[in-house]
Image: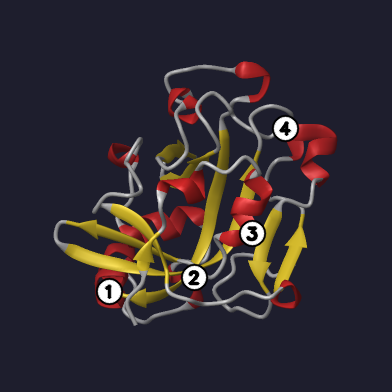
Amino acid sequence: MTGEKLPLSFYTRPNVVQVAQDLLGKYLFTNIGGMVTGGIIVETEAYSGENDRACHAHLNRRTQRTEIMYHQGGVAYVYLVYGIYHLFNIITNEAGKADAVLIRAIEPTHGLEEMQLRRNMPVVKPNLTAGPGVMSIALGINKKHYGTNLTGDTIWIEDRGRQVSPESMAIGPRIGIDYAGDDALLPWRFWLKGNKWVSRKK
């Protein structure tokens, strides 16, 4: 089954938490060097620019890294952590709001052999794409994709009709943001219950 690319209007909606939930079950694809890879989004996290201490743009912080966050939704925000991992985020809302959704994991469905090569994994295991850093490696996403238009042909997301019921979605606090104080407890991480490709099950 083929799907339709998500339109710009999907990304520019004002509620970043709702967008993060609605991304579950959608298909994330990349076309890097002519190789199409992708899979089902199974884990996301929401970040709000206006009132979230875990967000890179908190207190209207504008740096060379965060500048893309202030663009209109529908573009990629890619940044480096630990000097080795690129994390792929989707900017949402209207220009100036700096909201974003981190894609933490996908269930791989397309281009598995290419993803294995990128990850140097001779056997497909859940950690192939379970976690935002390794997922980006598998999909070929890196810093040069900062600002990529997600309605184009390099990185895009499709709706293939998969329905995610409230009962099949788990909700909990985000990961690795202890510095954010009380905001670290916000229930803004979402994942598909029982899916083996989720980075953390609890």
Residue holding disc 1: 111
What is the crowding at mark 2: few (fewer than 14 residues within 10 Å), some, or many (at least 20)?
A: some
Q: How is the image coloured?
A: secondary structure
Give amino acid for label 3: Gln
Residue holding disc 4: 52
Give amino acid for label 4: Asp
CA–CA distance in space, label 3 to label 1: 25 Å
Give how far across and how far down residue 32 sits, in percent: 21, 56
Question: Of residues 22 and 123, which is closer to you in this image?
Answer: 22
What is the crowding at mark 1: few (fewer than 14 residues within 10 Å), some, or many (at least 20)?
A: some
> Which residue occupies 32% across, 42% down?
149
Q: Is residue 173 above or below residue 36?
A: above
Give amino acid for label 1: Gly
Q: Is residue 171 left or right of residue 12?
A: right
CA–CA distance in space, label 4 to label 1: 36 Å
CA–CA distance in space, label 3 to label 2: 22 Å
**Looking at the image, is mark 3 or mark 1 earlier in the sequence?**
3
Residue holding disc 3: 21
**Looking at the image, is mark 4 or mark 1 earlier in the sequence?**
4
Mark 1, mark 2: which one is toward the viewer? 1
Contact check, label 3 and label 1, Cβ < 8 Å: no
> Which residue occupies 66% across, 36% down?
48
Contact check, label 2 and label 4, Cβ < 8 Å: no
Mark 4 element type: loop
